[in-house]
Image: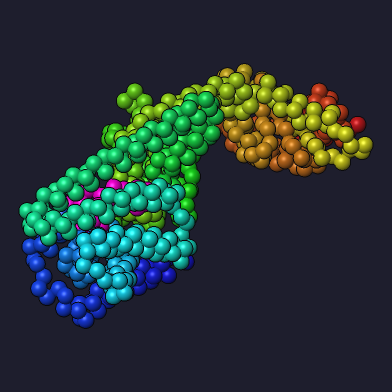
Amino acid sequence: MNKKRKYFFDITLGVIGLMGTVALMLFTTQYENLDILLFLLLLISGGILERIKVTVGEFAVSLDIAVMMASYFLLGIVPTLWLLIFFVLVYGVIFDTRPFVVTLSNTGMFTVIFIITHFVIVGVMNIYTSQSIIYDKLMVVFFGLNIFILNWTVLLGQIKLKGDKLPESLGETIRWDLYSYVVVIPLSILLIDASNYYGYKGLIILCLIIIGANILFKLLRNLVFINNELRVVHEVSLSISSKLDLTETTNHILKGINKLVNCDYCCVLHFDKTDLSVKVLNHKNFEDIDIDIENIKEKITESLDKLLEYKKSFIIENIERNNIKDEVRSVSKDIKSFIYEPLTLEDDIIGCVLIISSRANSFDKSQLNILDILSNQAVIAIENAKLYREAKNKAIMDNLTGLYNQKYFFDTLNVLTNKCSSCERKECIQCNRTSLVILDIDHFKRVNDTYGHQTGDKILSEVGNIIKSNVRNTDIVARYGGEEFTIILPRTDERTAYEIANRIRESIENRKFRSMDGHNISVTISGGVSEYPRNADSASTLLSYADRAMYTGAKRKGRNRISVYAS
């Protein structure tokens, strides 16, 4: 179901519920002699209980249902629906700052459930009547069970009709809701008895007891929740502490965060203070949310100076009610709430985690504490992975040009060519065809002698960049030594390799190089090409043939040309 249909569905459900309430008001006079004081006591008590409700995933569990059940048997269906509309619609919009359409839909759903249950109870009472106390108590139990069953039946049906994915916390929410009904049904019976036998004083005392029970219920739930959170943090900490690959490390962090807060999108960003830039370490879309990481990166970069000063995590529960809503909408209209969690190392911010939801009020401020703990573990793992990557790069990269070094070149060339040695085919089908290009800057010693080694280093770096920009990401460009460069071209024949090498030669020939003091310098290169296994049968012969092609076919014939090895 698309967004327009979901919107129409929510509006329709809300209108049906409200129209049902109006219809009951028109066709019943049960509420004309309403006990205003009793109604107000139940209204205040229910409002307090709604305020201290327990959040479980995307749902909320509260003991205010005990107040509404008691209201039904004390005041009737219409005043109970008034209470329900206040608790869900008015309270939700004003105090919980939920989107109006969602709150209207919830109101409609609950009013429909209560109206259906009302007629079920009336039907049962018409069939089975009794004046016994047990009968009255059984009716309350029956009412409560009907509400529970209808609530989850309608809710699951609503999710299915909308085509939404079942929340991961659904099973846990149903379990906790069932626990609450085990408490709610006896409490509603006590509320009814307190009002009938002890009047307002008894009702006030029992309402205070129920509020205390709700607080204890919330503390118990929070205790269980914190225990589960700590378990997740411990699992994530164990998994990332043993990882040295940066991508793998951040993947585990993103999955752990989603387990903790059930988000739609999450990204890990790194801050560079030297040039106030932002780098994306990893990002993951857990649900179908329209968001572009480049937009996030751009917006964070604009606010980076402020974020570097503000070292605390924060939560925006509802974008629509926040003064940054226009800025957030420029990133994505799907963002309704988010958490900003800084990554701090020794009081120095090195990055952040952004946790995003397409639903308002998806996150709770209590989640910030556990995310702070996880971020402390995450930042250490990220730094370790970065240090490992830097150390690994130093071992395989050339410091001057940023290209691979000679050792990595030989290792890669041997791996590629050794694949053929274990091949069991009777005839070669060129499945591991690899071409090698060797390039050498012409008269480079003359450049060093004339303009100095600093200019020479500058030209080496620029030539390396030109070569790198003219090949594929899968190709291996290395500085072989001095002014020589090599290019390993997997799955490439010598004809294509020649075209690539010649394109590089022309780019360098047409490039205007400058010395450190601004003098123009003309630079050319010569190169040789060889193919494996067509010409060469090993890594060493492949290198030897390419080198021979360069010197005999290019250098000796005037330089500034590319030559292909001919057997």
Is residue 62 one of those drawn in magenta? Answer: yes
Q: Position of residue 148 (x, y in %)?
A: 34, 59
Is residue 214 or residue 517 the one in the foreground?
214
Tell me where residue 480 sits by quadrant. Answer: top right
Q: Please state if 78 lies on the left or on the right of 281 as rendered.
A: left
Q: Quadrant of residue 89?
A: bottom left
Q: In percent of the image, x 73 and y 36: which residue is there? A: 489
Position of the C terminus, as image quadrant, is top right
Asked if residue 530 is among those painted magenta in the image, a careful observer would answer no
Identify the residue at the far right of this view: 426
Percent x, y of residue 238: 48, 27
Please give the name of the residue rendered at 16% of the width and 75% of the height, measured from the top-left corner: 30
Q: Nearer the viewer, residue 176 or 276?
A: 176
Q: Is residue 7 above or below residue 243?
A: below
Residue most extreme to the bottom: 27
Image spot of residue 500 (x, y percent):
72, 40
In this rendered view, identify the residue nearer to me: 492 or 367: 367
* Residue bounds of the magenta highlight: 48-67
Which residue is depicted at the point 38% across and 71% down? 8
Q: Is residue 249 visible?
A: yes
Across and down, in percent, residue 448 comes to: 61, 20
Residue 553 visible in image: no
Q: Quadrant of residue 431?
A: top right
Answer above or below: position of 233 versus 210.
above
Q: Report the label total.
A: 0
At x 81% / y 23%, what residue is drawn? 540
